[in-house]
Image (cartoon, grey):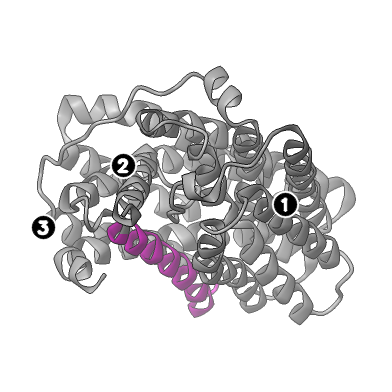
Amino acid sequence: MLSVLFRTWALMLGILLLMVGNGLQGTLLGIRGTLEQIDATWMGLIMAAYFVGFLGGSRLTPILLRRVGHVRVFAAFGSLVSAAFILYAAIVDPVFWLAMRLVVGFCFSGLYVVAESWINDLSSNENRGQALSLYILVQMVGVVTGQLLLNIADPSGYALFVLISVLVSVSFAPILLSASPTPVFSSARPMSLRELLDASPLGCVGVFLMGGVYSALLGMSAIFGAQRGLSVKEISWFVTAIYVGGMLMQYPVGWLSDRMDRRILIGALTALATTFAIAGMFGESTGWLIAMAFCIGATSNPLYPLLIAHTNDHLSTEQMASASGGMLFINGVGAMGGPVIVGFLIGRLGPDGFFLFLAILTGLICLYSLYRMRRSEAVAVADTHHYIPVTASATAVAVEMAAEAALSGDEQQQP
């Protein structure tokens, strides 16, 4: 991995700065919205707009790339994001914030596509898995760093919004100066949703429900903390714990998934996530909430790549790249509803509606995995593909890279 880092350090530095800004903006907006007395239902709609824009961007960005190229798309989208971050503080209005979140989600989808295309262009079959793992690690470190920066200024002022705008603007320099201007961009024709559902019912249902879990954790955790009466510092640690838990458990879960029936692991992780979410509703101390956040992140965040790996086990090598677009669409549809439902539940039931939503969705995945184990035989471990970590915010480029890396790993293990 050190050789990959040496070749891509400037690109990874730019991505790190980009992720610090994106990680900070979601939490900051949740806290600022509560300070401005925007109700939880409206905040749920605002947070959901990001995922609506992200899904739309994943569909339209390839068209823009073919028309004007990677550099222009990256510069245009980055400029819009930087401007939106400043405007959040300048115009405090829920309808305006919703529109800006839509723009930010759309633009970040395009920024990820361009960055991941450059990473893919700099990688070979031998190190693609390492490059993708490094990319995921940089993303997670960036998001965690963003949460900690929340403590350096007052969320009710302008300073933090200016900071995230500057971080995004500065991220352009290392990315644009280090990467080739025209990386190869190609996306396989997606499989139909019916074909995907027939191939892997658990993968499709699980990814759909995980979209809701992921968007709730990303978009509504800060709002939960503010509604619960946590301080800004406590909210930053609460959100940080979610990401740190997921970061630390990616590789242990991957190691286990390559050595056992993945449906059992999916059922075990979701059962634990459900237990931790229920436990979160009964905790009174801040330390307890942060501990439960860590455990929920540790058991839920690795589920997305685990479900992708399970789905790939039921596909031919030719289908794996084509399936990525469909899986991302299913995940995106699920993600759009998560913040809306959580916002409604918090507005009606109080802050514990956040944990209730997580418990219901992870519990449903657990029950469905048990049902699927009764309905079909397990794929032999020798016939499964390698687990490759990938986040739910990844685009089709990264998911296709993961499929290629998994196949390369399979070939290297063959005698």
How busy is the neighbourhood of tag 3: few (under 14 within 10 Å), some, or many (20 plus)?
few
Picture quarter with the C terminus = bottom left
Distance in Å between CA atoms under marks 2 and 1 = 32 Å
Q: Is residue 406 visible?
A: yes
Residue under circle 2? 113
> Could you say which is closer to the camera, residue 252 or residue 146?
252
Identify the residue at the far front of this view. 415
Residue drawn at 51 percent across, 57 percent down: 258
Choose top left, top right, bottom left or bottom right for residue 293. bottom right
67 magenta-colored: no
Picture quarter with the N terminus = bottom left
Residue drawn at 18 percent across, 70 percent down: 3
> Could you say which is closer to the camera, residue 16 or residue 365?
365
Q: Earlier in the sequence, mark 2 or mark 3?
A: 2
In this picture, which residue range is highlighted in magenta?
130-154
> Could you say which is closer to the camera, residue 315 or residue 383?
383
Q: Is residue 306 left or right of residue 22?
A: right
Element at label 1 = helix
> Could you say which is closer to the camera, residue 256 or residue 306?
256
Q: Is residue 156 visible?
A: no
Q: Magenta region's main secondary structure? A: helix
Choose top left, top right, bottom left or bottom right for residue 166. bottom left
Residue under circle 1? 267
Q: Is residue 402 left or right of residue 203?
A: left
Q: Earlier in the sequence, mark 2 or mark 1?
A: 2
**Amino acid residing under circle 2:** Val
Select label 2 or label 3 by which is in front: 2
Q: Compared to 163, does 338 lie above or below?
A: above
Residue under circle 3? 177
